[in-house]
């Protein structure tokens, strides 16, 4: 049985979550808390396997509560989030503070009916219970200052022949991704000689906020991808939530709302396979922390195209599912701890 602490300022919602989880036979509700301060205290008293927490509570915010939990007794936390731009900002606050994952409340729902997200909640709490939560460290300054002025958005590069395509690193990442990316991207210098595409499993609104945050703390530019964007050295494009990202024959970004893959859209396998086809041996596949197996087939496609592949190691992954699946598939050449990945990439 997975021992759960439920944190929410609504007694009605706490009851609904408790009823939903208890009915599965997989969870034991060891306690409840009505605000962040009580949550920090109850985690220390009860030692739950996982915490489910709403962001909007009286007193300290969900992010501050997560930060205190990570400081005093690191415990996996799964957040409840509103499916709005403000909800995305609040959720990213909590994720970068060390929360493992999040579940978005059904759009427009104000009741405690959790039937629409029950399967997702059960799946993410189950995975989170075995996670290694990591609090984000204080972010270092950008490795190299950008020359002012910096445009709000880098426009697409002129169309060139396939022979002029840059080296491209495609990153597959999911659970634990915001913290990992907040350590990886600031470690890359502004004159990084390869382009980057990040496929982070997140819904719409969330990837926009993620790109803005990473851009503010990195020497390279980071922006959410739009159709027609062209990867270029020193630029990281974040696949937009709820859209698959592929490349046309000239290397320009193509977005689609095709069927989910591994329950995900965007899916890294789709982006990596397309990159292998278009960029060939110029492609680097990097599989990082996350639940599931997305990225394994894509990394294998990159390797078969004579590209290079790398995975984050188990010790620094919040959840080792995605890297392990890629390693087990024979798709990975090298494995590295999170803080060594930036240096390894420079030599691939």
Image (cartoon, rainbow, N blue to C red):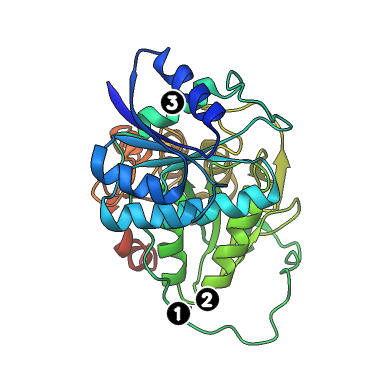
* Quarter residue 149 falls in: bottom right
Viewer can see residue 239: no
Viewer can see residue 250: yes
* Quarter residue 33 falls in: top left
Q: For the residues marked 3 and 2, what is the alpha-carbon distance in whole angstroms?
A: 36 Å
265 and 107: which is toward the camera: 107
Which residue in the protein does label 1 denote?
A: 143
Residue 97 as seen in the image, left or right of residue 226: left
N-terminal-most mark, 2 or 1 = 1
Above or below: residue 28 compared with residue 242: above
| Residue drawn where x is 39% and y is 46% of the image | 38
Nearer the observer, disc 1 or disc 3? Answer: 3
| Residue drawn where x is 74% and y is 32% of the image | 108
Above or below: residue 162 compared with residue 342: above
For label 1, the SS is: loop
Which residue in the protein does label 2 denote?
A: 219
In the rendered view of the protein, which quadrant contains the N terminus?
top left
* Quarter residue 291 falls in: top left
N-terminal-most mark, 3 or 2 = 3
Which residue in the protein does label 3 denote?
A: 123
For label 3, the SS is: helix
Contact between labelled residues 1 and 2, with CB atoms less than 8 Å apart = yes
Q: For the residues marked 2 and 1, what is the alpha-carbon distance in whole angstroms?
A: 6 Å
């Amino acid at each position: 049985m997975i021992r759960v602490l439920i944190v929410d300022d609504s007694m009605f919602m706490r009851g609904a979550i408790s009823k939903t989880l208890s009915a599965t036979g997989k969870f034991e509700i060891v306690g409840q808390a009505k605000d962040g301060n009580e949550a920090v205290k109850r985690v220390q008293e009860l030692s739950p396997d996982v915490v489910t927490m709403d962001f909007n509570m009286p007193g300290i915010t969900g992010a501050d509560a997560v930060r205190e939990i990570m400081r005093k007794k690191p415990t996996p936390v799964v957040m409840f989030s509103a499916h709005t731009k403000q909800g995305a900002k609040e959720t990213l606050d909590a994720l970068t503070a060390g929360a493992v994952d999040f579940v978005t409340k059904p759009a427009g729902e104000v009741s405690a009916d959790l039937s629409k997200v029950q399967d997702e909640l059960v799946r993410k709490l189950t995975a989170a219970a075995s996670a290694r939560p990591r609090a984000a460290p204080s972010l270092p300054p950008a490795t190299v200052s950008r020359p002012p002025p910096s445009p709000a958005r880098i426009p697409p590069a002129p169309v060139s022949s396939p022979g002029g395509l840059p080296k491209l690193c495609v990153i597959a990442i999911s659970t634990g991704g915001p913290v990992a990316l907040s350590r990886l991207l600031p470690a890359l210098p502004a004159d990084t000689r390869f382009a980057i595409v990040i496929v982070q499993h997140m819904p719409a609104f969330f990837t926009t906020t993620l790109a803005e945050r990473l851009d503010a703390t990195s020497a390279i530019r980071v922006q959410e991808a739009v159709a027609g964007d062209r990867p270029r050295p020193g630029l990281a494009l974040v696949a937009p939530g709820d859209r698959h990202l592929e490349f046309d024959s000239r290397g320009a970004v193509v977005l689609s709302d095709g069927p989910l893959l591994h329950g995900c859209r965007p899916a890294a396998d789709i982006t990596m396979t397309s990159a292998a086809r278009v960029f060939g041996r110029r492609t680097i596949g990097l599989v990082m922390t996350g639940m599931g197996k997305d990225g394994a087939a894509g990394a294998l496609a990159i390797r078969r195209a004579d590209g290079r592949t790398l995975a984050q190691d188990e010790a620094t992954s919040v959840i080792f599912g995605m890297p392990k699946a890629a390693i087990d598939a024979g798709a990975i050449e090298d494995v590295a701890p999170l803080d060594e990945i930036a240096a390894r990439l420079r030599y691939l």
